[in-house]
Image: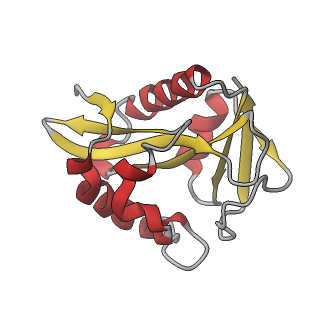
């Protein structure tokens, strides 16, 4: 199956918000302390237009079916970005899009001058954690920065 990864545009905001609100509860991440409640969810294009940030959408047959981005880690070291809001609808999983999306985001992070990339996730998101490990992310014993996502219980970092 072919797919396209491109920078987010304002016209994608509703689709990405819907994807986030569909996928997160699948993994028990619908409650307080998860990214589903972040203010940026309804205005992702504007949120990732900020300095040293980028967000990409995944399209299949012209429909947005996923996304992922990078941004500075809140209250973190200036050389650390966070891989953020990587969510794909079921039909976009298992086709190599996750690998391609991570590669795109990590390249954007390098281009923006970051030296390390951090990610938070949670128990049960096993396929995502396996993907992160394949891309050189290593587990951390505790969270970094101040994302506000106290519901996450797995943390990873990698050098860029």
- Outermost residue on the bottom side: it is 32
Q: In the picture, which quadrant includes the C terminus? A: top right
Q: Give residue 95's position: percent from left, percent from top.
A: 34, 32
Residue extending farthest to the left is: 61
Percent of width and height locating residue 110: 61, 22
On screen, residue 49 above or below 32: above
Q: In this rendering, would 130 be left or right of 42?
A: right
Q: Position of residue 125 (x, y in %)?
A: 56, 54
Locate residue 109: give its quadrant: top right
Residue 47's place in the image compared with 133, above or below, is below
**Residue farthest to the front, as pictured:** 51
The answer to which quarter of the image holds residue 20 is bottom left
Residue 108, given in percent of the width and then of the height, sits at 52, 26
- Asked whether 32 or 126 is in front, the reply is 32
What residue is drawn where x is 65% and y is 52%?
120
Q: How many marks?
A: 0
Quarter where residue 147 is shown = bottom right
Q: How is the image coloured?
A: secondary structure
Q: Residue at x 84, y 56 (%)?
A: 142
Does 13 sit above or below residue 114? below
Q: Who's the residue at 74% across and 33% down the image?
A: 79
Figure quadrant of the N terminus: top left
């Amino acid at each position: 199956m072919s797919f396209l990864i491109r920078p987010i545009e304002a016209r994608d905001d509703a689709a990405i918000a819907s994807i986030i609100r569909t996928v997160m509860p699948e993994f028990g991440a619908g409650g307080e302390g998860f990214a589903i409640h972040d203010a940026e969810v309804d205005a992702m294009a504007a949120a990732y237009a900020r300095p040293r940030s980028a967000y990409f959408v995944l399209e299949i047959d012209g429909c947005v079916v996923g996304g992922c981005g990078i941004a500075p880690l809140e209250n973190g070291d200036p050389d650390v970005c966070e891989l953020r809001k990587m969510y794909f609808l079921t039909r976009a999983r298992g086709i190599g899009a996750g690998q391609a999306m991570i590669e795109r985001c990590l390249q954007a992070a390098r281009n923006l001058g970051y030296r390390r990339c951090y990610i938070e996730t949670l128990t049960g998101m096993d396929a995502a954690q396996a993907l992160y490990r394949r891309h050189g992310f290593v587990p951390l014993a505790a969270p970094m920065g101040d994302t506000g996502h106290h519901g996450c219980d797995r943390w990873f970092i990698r050098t860029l």
